[in-house]
Amino acid sequence: MPGLMLLDTASLYFRAFYGVPESVTSPDGRPVNAVRGLIDMIATLVRSGSPTELVACMDADWRPAFRVAAVPSYKAHRVAEGDQEDVPDALAPQVPIIEETLDALGIARIGVAGYEADDIIGTCTARAKGPVDIVTGDRDLFQLVDDARQIRVLYTARGIRNLQVVDEAAVTAKYGIPGRTYADFATLRGDPSDGLPGVPGVGDKSAAALINRFGDLPAMLAALDAGQTEGFPAGARTKLSAARDYLRVAPAVVKVAHDAPLPDIDLTLPAEPRDKRALVALADRHGLDGPLNRLLDALAKTTA
């Protein structure tokens, strides 16, 4: 499905870091497993997906202030010293190399102060005129699937060579909810990996039943505030009432932004490197000849 491909870059380089041994090093002995793994992932995605546009979406702010203000527990368990994200020591120095390599290749790289990569993806998706493939290992982005606009998630849980295509039907089959209601569903059931508590006592089945009964979270909350009892599973109304303050603010945390102030840059898949000299220097310094040659070959063939 040629069109726009959006990479949840941190999701991919974390996967590469844990999937490629740390014994993969540069000529001077520094780990480059995440760098090499990510480059090979992009080459595979370009070959298999044949996108016309590609964006590496970045976390300029991994824990935005507006989300923490709404739900202070948001990602709090991942905070390291200095309010920085807890990143493995061997991975952190590889991120600047990844950024330099993407820039030398000419692959669009977008990060916006105060926003996460998810928000860049949400905004790019909202602006897209044609089909969109979102490559991620994060279920939060299931909220963006839209069959009418040909927006789908290529989910990496089983690996880059065995991507799960997630569309509205896949969301319905997995969670028993309408395909575009994942964000409301996730708000109700919570997500411990992001420090989002959800409504205590409301799990997947109860959350799905509520979504199916009321259609969406605003309609459910309106019924709750109106004192309606019909349609609420046994005990659910009491649990929801107790969590009313959380439910008032949580949607702003769970839902990705669609209006991040993106820079005006060319998203076109590059046929050749933007800066060949810089790319050669990076390849020599970090021992990236093999994966870069594979990616350059994939770019050339896809754009031919």
Image: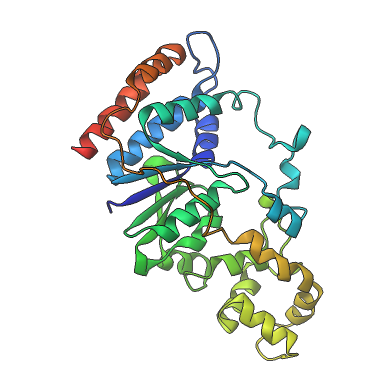
Residue at 59% of width from left, 83% of height from top?
Answer: 214
Left or right: where 288 falls relative to 98: left
Residue at 27% of width from left, 44% of height from top?
Answer: 50
Left or right: where 50 falls relative to 95: left
Nearer-the-camera pick, 143 or 83 = 83
Question: How far across and how far down the image is residue 53, in percent?
Answer: 33, 46
Relative to residue 231, is residue 13 depicted above or below? above
In terms of image quadrants, where is residue 215? bottom right
Quadrant in the picture for the N terminus: bottom left
Question: How far across and how far down the image is residue 266, in percent?
Answer: 36, 43
Residue 232 in view: no
Left or right: where 82 falls relative to 142: right
Question: How far across and how far down the image is residue 220, in percent?
Answer: 65, 81
Relative to residue 276, is residue 159 depicted above or below? below
Quadrant in the picture for the C terminus: top left
For the image, the number of numbered tags is 0
Residue 112 in view: yes
Q: Furthest residue to the front?
A: 264
Relative to residue 172, is residue 284 depicted above or below? above
Residue at 67% of width from left, 51% of height from top?
Answer: 194
Nearer-the-camera pick, 131 or 272 = 272
Relative to residue 84, is residue 225 depicted above or below? below
Q: Furthest residue to the top?
A: 28
Q: Furthest residue to the right?
A: 242
- Say how the picture is coloured: rainbow
Question: How far across and how far down the image is residue 172, in percent?
Answer: 47, 69
